Image (spheres, helix red, strand yellow):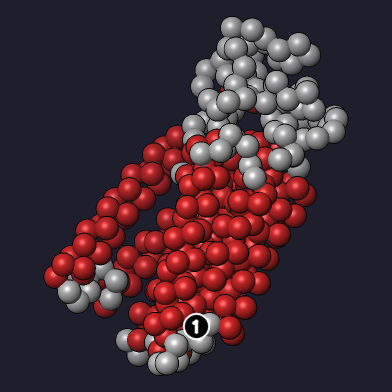
Amino acid sequence: MRSSNPVFSRRGFSRDNGYAVNAQQPQAGGPAVGTNPYATGNPYAAEGATNPYATNPYAPQDAQLGAPQQVRGNVMTIDDVVSRTAMTLGTVVLTAVLSWFLLPVDSANLGKSYGIAIGAALIAFVLAMVQSFKRKPSPALILGYAAFEGVFLGVISAAVSTYIADGVVIQAVLGTMAVFAGVLIAYKMGWIRVNRRFYGFVMAAAMGFMLLMVVNMLFAVFAGGDGLGFRSGGLGILFGVIGVILGACFLALDFKQVEDGVNYGAPREEAWLAAFGLTMTLVWIYLEMLRLLSILQGDD
C-alpha cells in the first residue's frame, strides 16, 4: 500500500514499486514466496508478498521485522533518514529566517515581498512535482524545494506576525514540534496502528478536506470575502484542528513507510526521499497550525 504522502505514493517504500521482484521466484538467501515472516504481521503487505528491495545487492537477507540483520553496505538506516531530514529542514529554516529579514512586509514593500513569496511557492511546487515523478531521489531537487519553500514560509510568517498576531510564529513552530514528538511517541509505543483501515480513513478524510478547501477558495475568488467561511470564525477553528489532525495522521503513515524501508533494506539514497516526504508533511502541519493560532488570537 502506498503512503498518503504524494512523494511516497509515487515511489516510496511501497510493496508494489519498482523494486518489486517476480512474485513467482523466491530470492536466493531469502524467505520463500508466501513464507515471508514479515508479510504475515504487516497489514500493508499482500498475501505472498516478497521483499521489494530484494534486488538491492546491499540489502540484508533477513527481512523479518525486529530480527537481527547483517547490514552489508549501502542500505538505508534510521540515522540516514535523520541526517537527511535535518539537512532538508535546516534548509527550510535557514531560507525562512533570511527571507524574514531580507524581504520586509511593511506597507512599502508588502506587495513586492508577497510577489517573491508566491513565485518561490510556485517554484517549490514544480520542484516537488519533478522529484515526485523521478525514479531516483535527487538531493539537489529536494534541497532546492526546501530552499524555495523556506522563502515562502518566511514571508508568510512575517506577514502573519506583523499584521495578525505577534508571537504566533513561535507558537506555531512549538506546536508543530509537539505534534511531531507526540505522533512519534504514540507510533513507537504502538498506540497508533497503521493498517489498511487507517490508511483508507486518512485518504478519504484528506480528499474531502482538500475538496472543501478548493471550493472555499473558488467562492472567495468569484464571490469575494472569505468564501464559505471555512477559514475564519468557528468553522475556521474547526477546519484548522482537522488540518492539524490530518497532518498528524500523515506523519504516522510516513513513519510506517520509513520503518518498512529500513526493515526491507532499502538503498541508502532512499533516505533523501524519506526526508523529502517528512518535510512536506511538517510544512503542512506548520501552515495549518499557523492558520489555527492566527484565528484563535484574532478572535481574542
Q: Please state which of residues 37 and 21 is positioned toward the viewer in this rendering.
A: 21
Question: In the image, residue 121 lies at what x, y percent?
Answer: 46, 64
What's the residue at 80%, 35% (across, down)? 74
* Residue type, numbered disc 1: Ala
31 up-or-down from 188: above or below: above
Question: In the image, residue 283 lies at what x, y percent?
Answer: 52, 62
What's the residue at 77%, 49% (across, down)? 79
Label total for image: 1
Q: Residue furthest bottom?
A: 107
Q: Residue furthest left?
A: 223
Question: In the image, residue 42 lies at what x, y percent?
Answer: 57, 30
Q: Please state which of residues 121 and 59 is positioned toward the viewer in this rendering.
A: 121
Residue indicated by mark 1? 158
As drawn, is 272 to the left or to the right of 179?
Answer: right
What's the residue at 55%, 45% (across, down)? 131
As drawn, is 170 to the left or to the right of 212?
Answer: right
Residue 72, quarter of the rendered image: top right
Is residue 120 visible to the viewer in this orientation of the structure? yes
Q: Please state which of residues 296 and 9 is positioned toward the viewer in this rendering.
A: 9
Quadrant for the C terminus, please.
bottom left
What's the residue at 61%, 58% (across, down)? 144
139 up-or-down from 47: above or below: below
209 up-or-down from 294: above or below: above
Mark 1: secondary structure:
helix
As drawn, is 218 to the left or to the right of 261?
Answer: left
Is residue 165 visible to the viewer in this orientation of the structure? no
Question: In the image, residue 260 lies at what x, y percent?
Answer: 64, 36
Residue 148, quarter of the rendered image: bottom right
For the residue carrying disc 1, how many other residues have a C-alpha within 10 Å: few (<14), some (14-19), or many (20+)?
many
